[in-house]
Image (spheres, rainbow, N blue to C red):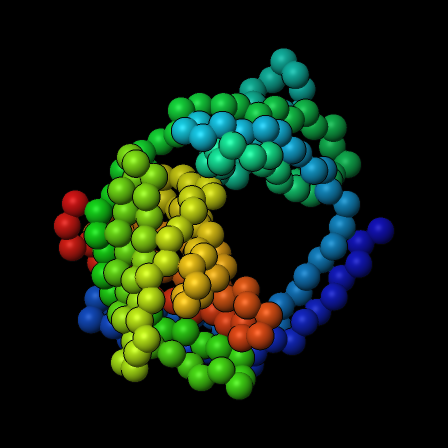
Amino acid sequence: MNTTQTIRWISRLTVAITAGGFCLAAHAADITVSIGQAVQLRWPSVVGRAYQIQVSTNLQSNWTPSGGLMEGSGATLGAFIAATNVQRFFRIHETKASPVSWLDGTWTGRAYAYNLPPAPNEEAMVELVVNATNRTFRTTYTFSAPPDCTATLRLLSYSDTRAEFQESTVGCSTGPIVLTRLNSTTIAFNFYYSDPTFPGTGAGLLTKVDD
C-alpha cells in the first residue's frame, strides 16, 4: 500500500543571473513525497573502492547498472530500490575508486541561498578545491558580511557527469551537495541545509580556474 503526502514548501522561484549564464534554483513549489514498498540493499565497504548496484531480470541475462558509483568509506553502505511486480536480481560490483578527473582542480563562482524565515537569504562567493586522487574536497564561502567559513566534503557517489557529497563543518552549512558537469569548465552547484533550525537550499554556477 502506498501512502502519498504532499508538502507545500516554498512558493518562490529564484533565478540567479551570473556572468557565465543563469542558474535556476527551484525553491519552488509543491513537493510530493511517495512512501511505498522498496528493496533495501546493504553491504560492507572498503576505503579506496567504489560500488555499483546492478540489476537483472534473469541471472543469465545482462546486468544493468542502477544509479552511480558509491564511494567506499569503511562502513556499511546501502540503498533503497523501489519494488516492482517484475522479478529482479541484484548484485554489488566492486571496483577501484575512480579519480573523478572531470572534477579535479579549483572552481569558483557565486551562489545564492534561500533560507526559510526567520533566517535571511544569503549570497556568497564559493571556492571549491578538489584533489580527487587523494580524495580531499573543500569548500570556502565568502559572504558580504563576516564570518566566512570553510567546510570539508565527503564524497558519497559519482558518475561521469555528477557527484554527490556530504558537507559538514562547524560554522558552515551542513547537508548534501550535488555537482553536475555542464561542460569541461562549468559545473552546477546545488546545496541543501539539513539544519532543523534554519533549513534551506541554494544553487550557483562554478567555473574552473586551474587544474
At 30% from the left and 62% from the top, the residue drawn is 140
Quarter of the figure that contains the C terminus: top left
Task: Please identify the quarter of the rendering in which residue 117 is found.
Answer: bottom right
Q: Nearer the viewer, residue 178 or 2?
A: 178
Location of residue 135 with respect to 21 vertically, above or below:
above
Q: Nearer the viewer, residue 87 or 185?
A: 185
Nearest the viewer among 40 and 5 is: 40
Name the residue located 47 percent from the left edge and 43 percent from the top edge.
Answer: 156
Task: Indicate whether 24 appears above or below 187.
Answer: below
**In the depicted structure, whether residue 97 falls above or below residue 60:** below
Q: Is residue 147 left or right of residue 185?
A: right
The image quadrant of residue 168 is bottom left
Q: Position of residue 5 (x, y in %)?
A: 74, 66
Q: In the rendered image of this protein, does residue 33 appear above or below residue 54?
A: below
Residue 64 in sight here: no
Q: Can residue 167 be seen in the rendering of this structure?
A: yes
Residue beneath the point at 54% across and 72% down: 199
Residue 10: x and y in percent read 56, 78
Q: Quadrant of residue 131?
A: top left
Percent x, y of residue 201 = 47, 69
Question: Where's residue 187, x and y in %?
Answer: 30, 55
Residue in the picture at 57% in, 25% down: 92
